[in-house]
Structure formats: C-alpha cells, structure tokens
Amino acid sequence: MLRKEGATAEDSRGAVTRRGRIAARLMPRRVRVRLTLLYGGLFVVSGAVLLTITYVLVNRSNGMLVFSRGRQDPSGDAGYRFYTGDGTSALLDRFAEAQRRQAQRQHTLEMHRLLIESGIALAIMSVIAIGLGWFVAGRVLRPLRTMTSTIQRISAHNVHERLAAEGPADELKDLADTVDGLLGRLEGALDSHKRFVANAAHELRTPLTVEHALLEESLIDRDATVESFRANFERLLVLSEQQARLLESLLTLSSSERGLGHREPLDLAELAGKAVLGCREQAERRGLRMEAATASAGTCGDSALVERLVANLLDNAVGYNVPDGWVEVVTRAEGEHAVVRVTNSGERIPPERVGRLFEPFQRLDRTAGDGHHGLGLSIVRSIAASHDATVDAHARPEGGLVVEVAFPLRAAEGTQDRHRNGGHRLPRTVSVTAAGDSASG
C-alpha cells in the first residue's frame, strides 16, 4: 500500500514537472514578444469586458409601458392593456400588438448586429493593440539593449568604460548606476590584483636572483674552500627562509580573504599572551620593552587566524621600532566589542601614509632585504574583515603607531546572527583612520 502511494506521489510530481517543461517551451523566449502578448491580452480582455457591459446596458428594457391581460369589462371588450407612468391604462388593439411584436424583433436584430459589429471592432483593435504593444515594448527595452551591448563590449582591457545612462531617475537609471558602481569596484579589484601580482613577482624575483648568483659563484670559483661553500650555503638558507615566510604570508592572506570555514569561541587575552611570548625574545634582542595588559575579551572566530593577526601586529611593532623603545599590548571588552590594541614607539609616520601601510607590499622607507615584505598589516586587515571586525590605526605624534582591532563580543554573537541575511555573514568595511583621515579596506 505504501509503495502504491509513493508511486502515485512520484507520478504526480513527474506530471507537474512535465507540464512545467511544456509551458516553458511554449513560452516565448524574447521579452519583447512576452510584453507584446501581455499588452495585447490585457487590451482584449478589457475590450471584451467593456463590450459586455455595453451590451447588457443596451439590452435592458428602458420603456415605461407595462402590459397585462385584462378580464372582459361590462362593455364586452377584452385584450391587452398598457399602463403608463401616470397610472392610466388603455386597451391595445391588434395593430398595436403587431407593432409591439415588430419592435421586439427589431430590438433583437439590432442587438445581434451590435454584437457582431462590436466583435469586428474588437478584432480590429486587437490587431492594432498588438502592433502598439510591439512598438511600446521595443521602446521600453531599448535602454536595456543599449546597456547589454555596452556590457558585452567591456572586458579587462576597457573595464574603465561606464554605461553613463541619461534620463529620469527611474528603475532603468538605477540599474545603470548600479552596474557602473559594480564596474568601478571591479576595476579597483583588477588594479589591486595587478599591483599585488607585480609586487609578489618582484619580491620573489629578488631572492631568486641572489640565490642564482651565489650558486653560480660557487661553481665558477675554482679556488673555493669549504668555508666559502659553507658561507654561501648559510646565505642560501637565509634566503630560503625568507621566501618560505613570504609564501606563508601569501597563503595566509589568500585563505583569510576567502572567509572563515568555521567559528569557535576564543579569548583575545589568551591569544595575545601566546603572541607576546613568541615575540619577547626578538624584542629583547632589539632592546625593546614589552608591556602587556590583557583582560578577558571573548569573541568567536578562527583561533589560528586571530593569533596570526595579533602576532603580525607585534611583529610590525617590534620590527619598525627604535632602540630603547617599547611595545604595549592591551585586550579588553568594551561595549559590544572585544578589542585588542597594539601601541609601539618608533619613527614618526606621516598621517597620510598610515592607510597605505595596510596595502600589500607597502613599507615606509625599508627595503626588501630587511626581512619585511610589507604583508603583515594587509594580513591583519584581511583577517579582521573575515571576522566582521574593524581596524582603526593612527600615527602617534611622538612617533610610532597605534592599531586597534575590535571584534564582535561573544555575548553579542547571537544578536549579530539575527541581522545576517539568510544566515550568511554581511561583510563589514575595515576602516583605517589616520589623524582624521580614513582609508577603506
């Protein structure tokens, strides 16, 4: 019995699917044809309803005469009587009765002719309506055809072109402006991608050139000793480690830009403590003082990426510092945010250049040989964006930098989920402020 019911349900679903496919095949593919049929159909239906109402109104009896069969009066006359509006009555003779019947037949013929002529008029106007509908549909779709042809011509070589639609601020103008905005963002992304690839190629080409020179020197020098070979190998090992760090940074940047695969509860204080322990030895070698004031600040995200964010902030603070300088790390819960802030002493940074430091391969006055590739803060920005966090940075007047990253507080995570579309994360803009200036990430 269950098998029969299941088979019946499957058959019904299959029939619905087949009917849907047939309807899709019968439906015209061009929007102009569909709009023409829609306009023509609406006119035909409206005309038919109008003619029906007219026919009913004309067909109604509008006379004031009421006929009745009377009894034989004392004078012996009997027959049809008609009653007028004033209440008087009169006896109809045979001639009047014949005239009444003739009038009824004439009325019937006129209504029949009215019906035929109305049908012919409706048919003629339907043809005219279809033609007008075709014309109007073409005029309505003309801006869309123009936008389509323009978009088809745009490629990576001429992505700077825009639709630049003119006319009233209607839905078509809004669509054109939206497409122009999308093309603008795409142009910016392509330019950023080109710069990123060029900078990455340059960063990788430099150590490869040095490696090739060292290997060539070892092969050409016939008087090379074990010590010279060892020195060259040590330099090659350093270059290999630098390339490995660069590739690791590029992979981290790429993975963080793809978004998070999972989220887990984490505490910024715990991650900041681990990062401080990892950087303390490097800070001591440079003669820097490390200060940490970590309070519990719970959030949700990828603990490995967040730990990498804090480590990059500390590495940047230690690497771009001055002798006898200091680095301060603070974590706290503030409002609905879990905040980590890294402040460091250092050389004075022009406020207008703070935003550029968060772009890939952007350094101040450093060269590629110092071990810094200019990816640390760009990775910070990318990881923050994937965690719905905001980044605020500004240069200290005395020198150095202050970078503050605000994550959603773990207690407010449920509130944020209710504001997400269909359970998907809404990306937040990462802002980098520098003495009143801002640069969007």
Image (tube, rainbow, N blue to C red):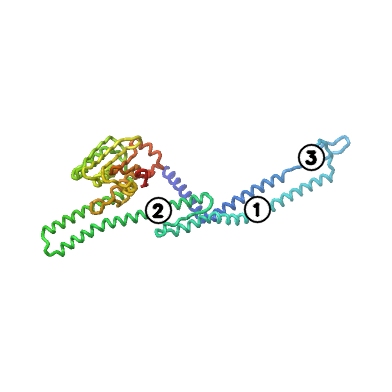
Residue located beneath label 2 in the image? 186
Judging from the image, what secondary structure is the residue with disc 3 in? strand
| First in sequence: mark 1 vs mark 3 | 3
Q: Which numbered circle lies on residue 321? A: none
Residue located beneath label 1 in the image? 122
Residue 187, given in percent of the width and then of the height, sits at: 40, 54
Residue 62, given in percent of the width and then of the height, sits at: 75, 42
- Measure how far apart labels 3 and 2 are at the Cα level: 85 Å
How many labels were placed on the picture? 3
Above-or-below relation of 365 to 72: below
Give the quadrant of residue 204: bottom left
Judging from the image, what secondary structure is the residue with disc 2 in? helix
Please state which of the two labelled residues, at mark 1 or mark 3, is closer to the viewer.
Answer: 1
Judging from the image, what secondary structure is the residue with disc 1 in? helix
Quarter in which the N terminus is drawn: top left
Q: Residue at x 69, y 47 (%)?
A: 55
Mark 1 surroundings: few (<14), some (14-19) or many (≥20) residues within 10 A: some
Residue located beneath label 3 in the image? 67
Mark 2 surroundings: few (<14), some (14-19) or many (≥20) residues within 10 A: some
| First in sequence: mark 1 vs mark 2 | 1
Please state which of the two labelled residues, at mark 3 or mark 2, is closer to the viewer.
Answer: 2
Please name the amino acid that badge 1 sits on.
Leu
- Measure how far apart labels 1 and 2 are at the Cα level: 53 Å
Residue 142, given in percent of the width and then of the height, sits at: 53, 56
Q: Is residue 221 left or right of residue 327?
A: left
Please name the amino acid that badge 2 sits on.
Leu
